[in-house]
Image: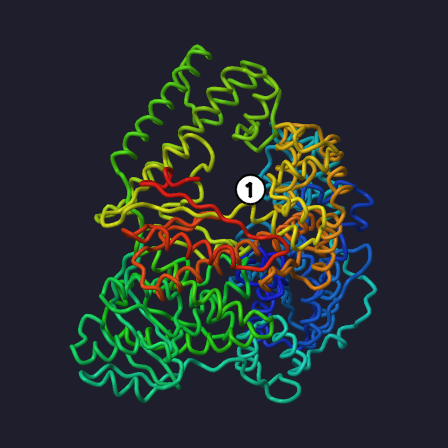
């Protein structure tokens, strides 16, 4: 039942802040509470398997062989479930060499002998054989919440045989999950007909020669399997167990132990459910509530009363809003404010002049604290409404949740309310990926529903901000939130609202060029093969490459052999076949065509592209973008340069300026490791990769070849990204032996880099997390996983996190500094984009020199490292022309 819960509930929504996955525990506990409440048992026991080895595998080694390996995330929850059972006062049992079903069978037999009515909750159909007039099976139909009651009548209706003969039927049909093959061509209906006709499997076997047709022959051919199945599927009903029937009496749940465990697991509703459902079975003091029901005294705005309400609520005020927000534009439907248990609701479109003046003055007042859930979305709406930018942001609950759990996929307000407050929030609206309340459902479109939902949401945001602030402080992340991440939301909103001018005609031309190149590649591929085929069909490509052309097989998949880009590139390296050249060319230009098409599709009526920046997608802290994604434009290729040439200076400005960091990850690595050789290489002023290559290969800088430099660059950046030796060999097209030797030579020369990389993983294994130079934490529970693959993935990510995260912190610090300096100096120039390690700015007439000096100062001074942060600048009438 726990295993079913594991797959029924998404792991990303059920884990503690330090990374302990809890979905199986939560689902199992929720089901168990329902059973205890609904069935009111006097005796309870839970049985566990110890391993897959049992007396059954001694007879048949392939028993249960086909099952996938049990996920490490599930295994780690079993001891927690057992702790839960002990807190609930419930006995749990195991037995060496036997399965949990055998324990259940023995307990059911003893229970029946004691004259009790017995309920078995199990997802294993073998338990059907135990059902009788006093034993009922509760079998899960969906997840672990919908349980069907299997009585003798229900079983006979469903399977055509009574429970006592279900073993016979199962032996004939087989059980795929146990790797017990049945009789080919014989299904449940035929098996049931035989058992009814001959009375039992024994009766059928005695008359086996009389069974006619293919089914009869199939039965005779597979009779040994059937008899083996019948032996193995019999449940053992007479085990010696440490508890007798009376020892399983359930007295009730232990309040202190249960609450302590629920607190540790961050289950903030189950305690309430236990107390309300089974309060009469609580042992110890009354269970304290883990959360209060949302309770705000809500009022609608009376005309002319906005200033009075704001003046009366001098604490930090939470803002909840609904509306439609996309691609840097937005409009509000409703807004609710909450502070001190009181809420105020209004429709922004209906504000009179007096109320709007009071509202906008309060919005712009940095001394008046505000809590918002997704302030960036609010900023879009405020800009569209002509209001000033929100000042005085004290917390964005989306960003707070991200800092506490950066691997979480979504940060919707309803999910966070449950996660942090144990409170169910029924909003009138759906929620976006980042949590903004948008798009009212039709049923909720009336003012009454909006009013109640918005006020409840505002109350939740206020409480959620307080809960997150406390946890951020506990994790030493409060300063990071308040000094970097929260203020950055306003900077990003300004970037999105500004957008960047786009040359639609240029994009149309290069899209057509890429389409023509794709057609050329297609025509040439068809000529090589001698017929037309679908270039995008994996099935047709498999037939051509591996059957007709008999090329070396790639990695096997469920549908044949992989034809992904990486596999085709490796095949081309091996064979140099012209068809592969055209396939790879086709895929490259198709990808580029799609990139350009997406760019054209996002040009808005103002002639500008307004990308959306995301703070909560990359766990390392890096920013990402979407609609369009500016991170996927090729950096160094001619095609990438063509695309960037379509981003141009806007009307009223004289040029674009780009400024980017030089080898920022390498500089961070030199600073974090303290390696004198690496630091010296940077301070020499020479090309860093050439200088490092000279040291590794033991040659003078002037003797470093292009191949030397290429290998060292891949090695250096590979270290920053946690690249394995195998990955390095694949990237450079060299053997793993050569890659290992390269790594050895590198570390022999830069020993402190090797020491740091080892230390950072071992330290993270002890503490559970890594930290950047500015204190950003990332947790890695899989560093102690029993699953080698997951553990090694976590190790690579732990190597990467401090360097990548520090690069993100430096860029964010620079962006905050540039934004503040631009505003304090009153410049009209502005930042438009942040992509990778680069800022793209729009230069107002006459401000080029001041802007360059200002941005250079802020970027180079964003952090103090052991080596200087260097930046390069360029100017031009397009993003490409401004490259340097």
Q: Residue at x 26, y 70 (%)?
A: 334
Quadrant hosting residue 737? top right
Q: Is residue 829 above or below residue 417?
A: above
* Numbered marks: total: 1
Q: Nearer the viewer, residue 85 or 182?
A: 85
Identity of the residue drawn at 61% across and 40% down: 686
Q: Judge whether residue 450 can be spotted in this image.
A: yes
Q: Position of residue 764 (x, y in %)?
A: 69, 59
Tell me if 155 is positioned left or right of 336 in this view.
right
Which residue is at 65% across, 69% downward? 118
Res. 241 image quadrant = bottom right
The answer to whether residue 9 shows anywhere in this view is: no
| Image: 844 above or below 25 | above
Q: Looking at the picture, how far across and down is residue 620, in whole percent?
A: 55, 55
Task: Give the residue displayed 65% in from the left and 78% down from the top.
Answer: 260
Tell which of 270 and 360 is nearer to you.
Answer: 360
Q: Position of residue 288 (x, y in %)?
A: 57, 85
Q: Position of residue 87 (x, y in %)?
A: 68, 76
Q: Between residue 256 and residue 136, name the one nearer to us.
A: 256
Viewed as shown, does residue 660 lie left or right of 317?
Answer: right
User: Considering only vertical position in the picture, is 611 above or below 734?
Assistant: below
Residue 681 is left or right of residue 392, and the answer is: right
**Residue picked out by circle 1:** 189
């Amino acid at each position: 039942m726990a295993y079913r819960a594991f797959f029924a509930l998404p792991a990303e929504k059920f884990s503690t802040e330090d990374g302990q996955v809890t979905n199986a525990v939560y689902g199992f506990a929720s089901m168990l509470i329902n059973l205890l409440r609904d069935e009111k048992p006097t005796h309870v026991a839970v049985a566990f398997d110890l391993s897959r080895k049992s007396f059954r595998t001694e007879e048949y080694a392939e028993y249960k062989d086909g099952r996938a390996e049990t996920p490490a995330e599930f295994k780690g929850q079993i001891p927690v479930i057992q702790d839960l059972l002990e807190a609930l006062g419930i006995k749990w049992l195991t037995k060496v060499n036997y399965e949990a079903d055998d324990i259940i069978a023995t307990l059911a037999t003893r229970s029946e002998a004691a004259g009790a009515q017995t309920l078995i909750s199990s997802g294993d159909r073998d338990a059907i054989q135990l059902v009788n007039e006093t034993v009922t099976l509760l079998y899960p139909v969906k997840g672990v919440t919908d349980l069907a009651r299997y009585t003798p009548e229900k079983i006979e209706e469903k399977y055509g045989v009574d429970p006592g003969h279900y073993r016979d039927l199962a032996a004939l049909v087989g059980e795929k999950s146990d790797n017990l093959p049945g009789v080919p061509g014989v299904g449940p209906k035929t098996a049931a007909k035989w058992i009814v006709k001959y009375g039992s499997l024994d009766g059928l076997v005695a008359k086996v020669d009389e069974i006619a047709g293919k089914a009869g022959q199939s039965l005779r051919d597979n009779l040994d399997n059937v008899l083996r199945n019948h032996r193995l599927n019999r449940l053992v009903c007479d085990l010696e167990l440490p508890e007798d029937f009376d020892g399983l009496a359930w007295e009730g749940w232990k309040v202190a132990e249960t609450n302590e465990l629920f607190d540790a697991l961050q289950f903030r509703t189950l305690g309430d459910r236990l107390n309300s459902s089974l309060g009469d079975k609580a042992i110890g003091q009354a269970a304290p509530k883990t959360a209060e029901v949302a309770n705000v005294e809500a009022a609608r705005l009376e005309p002319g009363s906005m200033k009075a309400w704001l003046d009366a609520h001098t604490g930090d005020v939470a803002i909840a809003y609904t509306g439609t927000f996309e691609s840097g534009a937005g409009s509000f439907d409703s807004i609710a404010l909450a502070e001190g248990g009181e809420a105020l609701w209004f429709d922004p479109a209906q504000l009179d002049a007096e109320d709007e003046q009071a509202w906008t003055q309060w919005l712009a007042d940095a001394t008046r604290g505000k809590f918002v859930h997704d302030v960036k979305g609010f900023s879009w709406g405020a800009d569209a409404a002509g209001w000033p930018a929100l000042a005085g942001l004290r917390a964005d609950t989306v960003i707070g949740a991200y800092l506490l759990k950066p691997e979480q996929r979504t940060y919707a307000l309803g999910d966070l309310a449950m996660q942090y407050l144990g409170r169910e929030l029924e909003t009138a609206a759906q929620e976006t990926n980042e949590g903004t309340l948008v798009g009212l459902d039709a049923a909720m479109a009336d003012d009454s529903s909006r009013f109640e939902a918005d006020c409840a949401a505002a109350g939740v945001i206020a409480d959620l901000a307080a809960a997150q602030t406390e946890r951020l402080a506990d994790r030493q992340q409060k300063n990071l939130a308040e000094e970097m991440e929260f203020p950055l939301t306003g900077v990003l909103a300004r970037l999105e609202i500004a957008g960047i001018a786009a040359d639609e005609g240029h994009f149309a031309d290069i899209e057509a060029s890429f389409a023509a190149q794709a057609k050329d590649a297609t025509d040439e591929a068809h000529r090589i093969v001698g017929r037309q085929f679908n270039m995008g069909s994996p099935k047709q490509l498999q037939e051509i490459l591996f059957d007709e052309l008999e090329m070396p097989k790639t990695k096997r998949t469920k549908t044949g052999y992989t034809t992904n880009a990486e596999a085709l590139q490796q095949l081309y390296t091996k064979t140099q076949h012209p068809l592969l050249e055209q396939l790879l060319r086709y895929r490259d230009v198709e990808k580029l065509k799609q990139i350009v098409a997406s760019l054209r599709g996002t040009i808005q009526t103002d002639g500008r592209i307004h990308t959306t920046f995301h703070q909560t997608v990359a766990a390392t802290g890096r920013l990402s973008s979407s609609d369009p994604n500016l991170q996927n434009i090729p950096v160094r290729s001619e095609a990438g340069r063509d695309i960037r040439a379509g981003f141009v200076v806007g009307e009223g400005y004289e040029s674009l300026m780009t400024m980017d960091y030089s080898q920022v990850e390498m500089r961070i690595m030199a600073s974090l490791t303290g390696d004198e050789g690496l630091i010296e290489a940077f301070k020499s002023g020479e090309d860093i990769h050439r200088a490092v290559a000279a040291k590794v290969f033991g040659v003078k800088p002037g003797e470093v070849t292009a191949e030397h430099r290429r290998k060292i660059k891949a090695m250096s950046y590979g270290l920053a990204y946690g690249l394995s030796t195998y990955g390095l060999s694949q990237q450079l097209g060299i053997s793993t032996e050569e890659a290992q030797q390269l790594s050895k030579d590198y570390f022999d020369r830069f020993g402190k880099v090797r020491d740091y990389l080892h230390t950072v993983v071992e330290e993270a294994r002890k503490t559970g997390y890594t930290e950047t130079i500015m204190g950003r934490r990332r947790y890695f529970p899989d560093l102690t996983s029993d699953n080698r693959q997951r553990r090694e993935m976590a190790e690579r990510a732990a190597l990467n996190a401090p360097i990548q995260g520090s690069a993100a912190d430096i860029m964010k610090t620079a962006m905050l500094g540039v934004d503040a300096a631009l505003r304090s100096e009153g410049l009209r120039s502005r930042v438009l984009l942040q992509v990778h390690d680069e800022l793209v700015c729009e230069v107002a007439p006459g401000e080029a020199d001041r802007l360059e000096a200002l941005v250079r100062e802020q970027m180079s001074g964003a952090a103090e490292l052991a080596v200087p942060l260097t930046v390069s600048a360029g100017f031009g009438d397009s993003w490409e022309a401004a490259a340097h």
